[in-house]
Image: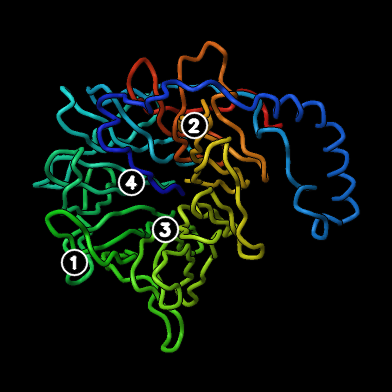
Amino acid sequence: MAEAPQVPAGWIATGRLHSGGVAPRPRRHRMLLAKRLRPWFQYAQRFASELRLTSVLPAWWTCWMIPPYASYVVQDLGTLGGASAAANAINDVGQVVGESWTKNNLTTHAFLWDKGVMTDLGVLQPHDWSTASDINEAAIVVGYSGSGPRVQLVGPFRGFSWNNGSLTDLGTLPGDTSSWAWGINDAGTIVGTSALTTATNPAHFRPYVYSNGVMVQVGFVAPGQDGLVNGEAFDINNSGLIVGGGVTLKSSGLSRAFSFDGAILRDLGSLGHQSEARAVNEAGRAVGQAAPDAMWVDTIKPLEDLGTLGGFLSAAYDVNDIGDVVGWSQVATQPSSVADHAFITRGCWMFDLNNLLPATAAWELLFACGINNQGQIVGWGLHQGNVRAFLLTPNGPRQ
């Protein structure tokens, strides 16, 4: 399931990019090296697997140096009449959700894209705009809506679910005025954030789980154990494992990535600073950001730094059941400038998705937000002067 990274205010309507402009495609030497070493590396991995040595060998022995697919076909998903759109999540049948500017670029509406047709999901009344965060295999969509100018992001907000043409207001936790819906599993259980919002800023974020019309705060545990003071729940898998980020009683005020299975709240660690988990797959492997880099963690191994594409920052937004991770990373364009590029990882190796497009593709892929088990990737990038939603489909078999 994919959590929805939000489009920076002002980008989607104007197509603005960093002042450095369109960045070149860096680190092609990594791919050339990977091709030369691939036969030896595959033999070494096969040998280790047959002797059942993979559990005791260093991590780099199981770190593939080739991308999951050699190339992708890129598709512009269109818009709801405006100039720009962004895709946030995709399910295993290829249905995509996100947000698009409407006619005359006056506001944004959540959309569902299916087999070439983009459907406007509307807004909760009396709100003006909406965005879709996630979709499950039954095509139930979750997101949130709000009022006022889209680029100002002034609350209050309200989480919603959409099912077969009907929008449902999820409400808030007691005493709160705003909510956001971030993730949904195949049972229809929703996770998100509830907060008390003022005119300018929200306060005391609280993660919630919503099922059968009832919203409950996440992170309450038995007396004497560590618990969440505040935080956000971003994703839930089909086993009911919830991941997010929050401040706990023992985290000294720093937000830490967490998992919660309904009974045990687990601190997933950090790289010395704050961290948050954005998505979790069916194996319980979570991905997110541990400032300043993207991270990977599962129920057995410690947190792992996924690195960057040459810049200073990166963040992982989704992971499929195979273990492929997507997100964004800064790339070094010049000594004094950086730009964001979408990435995919295989093991501990990170690949710039722009390097896996045909040479004739007129795209710069900025953010990869969702990936399904067929290897299809959605997100948003710069195309013909505007931010547009993209769908990447693998061109050929998995390597």
Identify the residue at horizontal 38%, vertical 31% (top origin).
Answer: 114
Please say if the residues under marks 1 and 2 sit with CB atoms less than 8 Å apart.
no
Instruction: Please report whichever mark, 4 or 1, sits nearer to the chain's N-terminal start.
Output: 4
**Which quadrant does the C terminus fall into?**
top right
Residue 120, percent from left and from top = 24, 33
**Viewer-side label of 4, 1:** 1
Check disc 3 and report the residue beneath it. 187
- In three-dimensional space, the C-alpha distance between marks 3 and 1, rounded to whole angstroms, equals 26 Å
Check disc 2 and report the residue beneath it. 341
Left or right: where does residue 16 sit relative to residue 124?
Answer: right
Callout 2, which amino acid? His
Secondary structure, mark 4, is: strand
**Viewer-side label of 3, 1:** 1
Instruction: Please report whichever mark, 1 or 2, sits nearer to the chain's N-terminal start.
Output: 1
- The front one of 373 and 177 is 177
- In three-dimensional space, the C-alpha distance between marks 1 and 2, rounded to whole angstroms, equals 36 Å
Q: Residues within 10 Å of mark 3 (few under 14, many from 20)?
A: some
- The front one of 355 and 393 is 355
The image's mark for residue 141 is 4
Instruction: Please report whichever mark, 3 or 4, sits nearer to the chain's N-terminal start.
Output: 4
Callout 1, which amino acid? Asp
**Viewer-side label of 4, 2:** 2
Q: Residues within 10 Å of mark 1 (few under 14, many from 20)?
A: some
Residue closest to the far front: 336
Identify the residue at horizontal 46%, vertical 41% (top origin).
Answer: 91
Callout 4, which amino acid? Val
Left or right: where does residue 247 sit relative to residue 206?
Answer: right
The image's mark for residue 176 is 1
Residue 182, percent from left and from top = 35, 52
Residue closest to the far bottom: 224
